[in-house]
């Protein structure tokens, strides 16, 4: 099936979403830099997994922190770069020239806010490698990520529908 090309429009973000993107990339940069700077202080065995109750139930060697830091940087950067190309996304509805800007803005918000929650989760996991109890932050980040995903899909669907102001 041959689908028509989607328009390529730059997302228009509000100040809250722009701030979320800035906080996400800043937290990631600072967290990765600090994780590398203090790597010599990491114990030889670090927590790498938690159960649903927030209790550590998996451990690994200290070099796993380097994997975590690299994954954190790649995830945050990838999500924020992807947020710049909402015309690439798969949407739960048709994208037309009439709704593209609204749908793209909703898709971009989903990626930006997801990057913020991912940054929180990865930052908390990094803190735990240094012996800081961050299970609550990981749980909150997971809840935020799931909530953002649900809200993002609903937001995208609603954005595809005409309104009185945007027919």
Image (cartoon, rainbow, N blue to C red):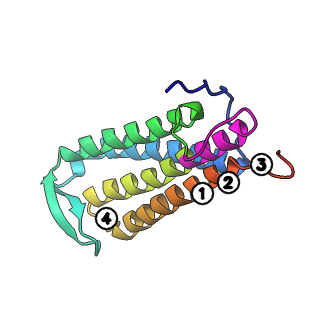
- Residue 162 rendering spot, x and y as whole percentages: 77, 48
Q: Is residue 84 visible?
A: no
Instruction: State how far apart marks 1 and 4 are (Cα).
Output: 36 Å
Badge 3 crowding class, 10 Å Cα cut-off, few under 14, some 14 to 19, many 20 or more, is few
- The residue to which callout 1 is attached is 154
- The residue to which callout 2 is attached is 158
In the rendered image, which quarter contains the C terminus? Answer: top right
Instruction: State how far apart marks 2 and 4 are (Cα).
Output: 41 Å
User: Which of the two discs, 2 and 4, sits closer to the camera?
Assistant: 2
Q: Secondary structure at mark 2?
A: helix
**Label tally:** 4
| Residue 2 among magenta residues | no
Whether pointer 2 and pointer 3 mark residues with C-beta atoms closer than 8 Å, the reply is no
Quadrant in the picture for residue 136: bottom left
Badge 4 crowding class, 10 Å Cα cut-off, few under 14, some 14 to 19, many 20 or more, is few
Whether pointer 2 and pointer 1 mark residues with C-beta atoms closer than 8 Å, the reply is yes
Residue placed at 31% from the left, 64% from the top?
132
Q: Is residue 12 left or right of residue 75?
A: right
Badge 1 crowding class, 10 Å Cα cut-off, few under 14, some 14 to 19, many 20 or more, is few
- The residue to which callout 4 is attached is 132
- The residue to which callout 3 is attached is 162
- Residue 90 rendering spot, x and y as whole percentages: 51, 39
Q: Disc number at residue 25?
A: none
Of label 1 and label 4, which has the lower sequence position? 4
Of label 2 and label 4, which has the lower sequence position? 4
Badge 2 crowding class, 10 Å Cα cut-off, few under 14, some 14 to 19, many 20 or more, is some
Residue placed at 46% from the left, 36% from the top?
77
């Amino acid at each position: 099936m041959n689908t028509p090309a989607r328009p390529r429009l730059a997302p228009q973000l509000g100040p809250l979403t722009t701030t979320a993107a800035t906080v996400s990339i800043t937290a990631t940069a600072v967290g990765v830099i600090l994780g590398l700077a203090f790597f010599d202080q990491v114990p030889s065995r670090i927590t790498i997994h938690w159960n649903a109750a927030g209790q550590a139930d998996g451990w690994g060697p200290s070099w796993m922190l380097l994997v975590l830091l690299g994954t954190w940087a790649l995830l945050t950067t990838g999500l924020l770069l992807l947020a710049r190309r909402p015309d690439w996304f798969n949407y739960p509805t048709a994208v037309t020239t009439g709704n593209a800007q609204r749908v793209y803005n909703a898709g971009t918000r989903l990626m930006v806010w997801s990057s913020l929650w991912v940054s929180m989760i990865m930052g908390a996991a990094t803190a735990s490698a240094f012996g800081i109890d961050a299970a609550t932050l990981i749980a909150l980040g997971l809840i935020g990520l799931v909530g953002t995903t649900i809200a993002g899909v609903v937001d995208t669907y609603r954005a595809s529908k005409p309104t009185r102001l945007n027919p």
